Amino acid sequence: MKRFGEILTGAILAFGFLAFWPGTVGFAQTQSQAKCGEWVARIVSIEGRVETLPAGETNWQAVKLEDTYCPEDRVRTLEKSRAAFILKNETTLRLDENTMVKFSSLAPESPSLLQLLTGSAFFMSRYPRPLTIETPYVNAASGGTEFNIKVNPDDKSTTITVIEGQMNLTNEAGSAVVKAGQEAVTMAGQPPVVRIPVRPRDAIQWALYYPPIMSLRDLHLEATEGLPETDWRSMVQRSVTAYNEGDIGKAFTALEGAPAEVDDARFYVYRASLLLSVGRVDQAKSDIEKALALDPGNGLALALQSVIAVVGNDKQAALKLAMEANQAEPDSVSVKIALSYAEQANFKLDEALASVQRAVKLDPDASLAWARLAELWMAHGYLDKALESANKAAALNPKEVRIQTVLGFAYLTEIKIDKAKEAFMKAIALNSADPMPRLGLGLAMIREGNMEEGRKQIEIAASLDPNNSLIRSYLGKAYYEEKRDPQAQIQLEMAKELDTR
């Protein structure tokens, strides 16, 4: 196994961020308040429409970031929505769309209980504390592991996939032990059946983060004035406006009246990019296929396929697809951004920088391209140029989350901790599903001596993108600093595996 420093250096080069780790740290604890006096869960990421039903009440209510929950409260995600939580027992919990949980007993020092009523949930816990998840068809007990549970009411089944560690499953018909790399399917009234999936991590594909690349310029929808509201181009314009304002639910709602079949690839390309933003990769792939059927060799569709390959750690395929996209549409800003990600994933930093420099020349008003350029200037160590590009992006679109993230890392590099934290928190407020501001906030907290809270932020980052090797590397380092060597070893091995897939 590589030493931590070797892994970390490679990860920094791959993702383009620098940070400092302190030699000594202190300990601190922040507290959140709940109406019951002792919260059992706190929401740290919201995408789309997420609602809660407090214990004893009958009306579902919209949630807000950093809300806390009491025993017997319920939370549900609606279609094309996701959410993430920190539980009182220091487990991170991520909910997929159409999922409902009921928070029960979640004490730090005693056995904990949570009910998953329907949908999919990803759990990550690094403390050997008993946690039981009740589902309609089987109960699962863990003591510090990573796993995904999916409850499917249609076929009355529960599927549990263990990424790391092991789970003990029981119901009235039998029991089973599920180890890392295995999954168990339990049908109603039947004992759990253990099997080995070909790709266990496919179970958490819904939880991954796909970086945005889409530039409205490339859709060529500028002349939509005078079109009826029912025209798909008008719908996309309204959707883009909602997305830029941070309302992903409204962005999808704007597309709901579109015809079942649209004879223009641009519609499917845009909807695919929107679907990727909430982890609906299978639906996104379907729309990409429709776009390519209408327009074989469509550069934007190929660019989205490249992004999917980057996130899936298929680096060679990502670069091949991005180069094909660039050949098909050499004047596309979106394609150039996608190409930069593929080149960076293959450690071609100079080429990645050049690709984004061409993107901002193609469209000097593309805020996303300027934000991406700032990231790559920072990867090259040019802090002044990174800040200049970030400020340019901010002037074009103050709500662009990547801008605040780059500013945060720039301040962190200069040891301006308060300013770094402020920028990262702004980024989280703009897009709580982006893992990088959480990573940055964690590093800033650690740099100021708050190891425990900093490590928790990095754990949140890992739950927001479980396949990110950079985040895993930093999480391993945090555990190492806390003298939790077994947990550190697991994370560093995981980072190595993800980085070499």
Image (cartoon, rainbow, N blue to C red):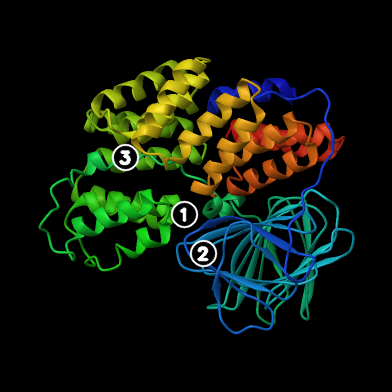
**Lower position in the chain sequence, tag 2 or tag 1:** 2
**Lower position in the chain sequence, tag 3 or tag 2:** 2
Q: Residue at x 81, y 32 (%)?
A: 480
Spatial CA distance of label 3 from label 2 is: 26 Å
Q: Residue at x 71, y 37 (%)?
A: 475
Spatial CA distance of label 1 from label 3 is: 19 Å
**Lower position in the chain sequence, tag 1 or tag 3:** 1
Report which residue position mark 3 lands on. 302
Pointers 2 and 1 in contact (CB under 8 A)? Answer: yes
Local SS, label 2: loop
Report which residue position mark 1 lands on. 278
Q: Is residue 100 above or below residue 354?
A: below
State the image coordinates of residue 425 (x, y, percent, origin top left): 58, 42
> Can residue 65 be seen?
yes
Q: Amino acid at mark 1?
A: Val
| Residue 300, quarter of the rendered image | top left
Q: Is residue 137 above or below residue 8?
A: below
In this rendering, position of residue 284 left or right of residue 315: left
State the image coordinates of residue 82 (x, y, percent, origin top left): 53, 59
Q: Amino acid at mark 2?
A: Glu
Q: Residue at x 83, y 56 (%)?
A: 143
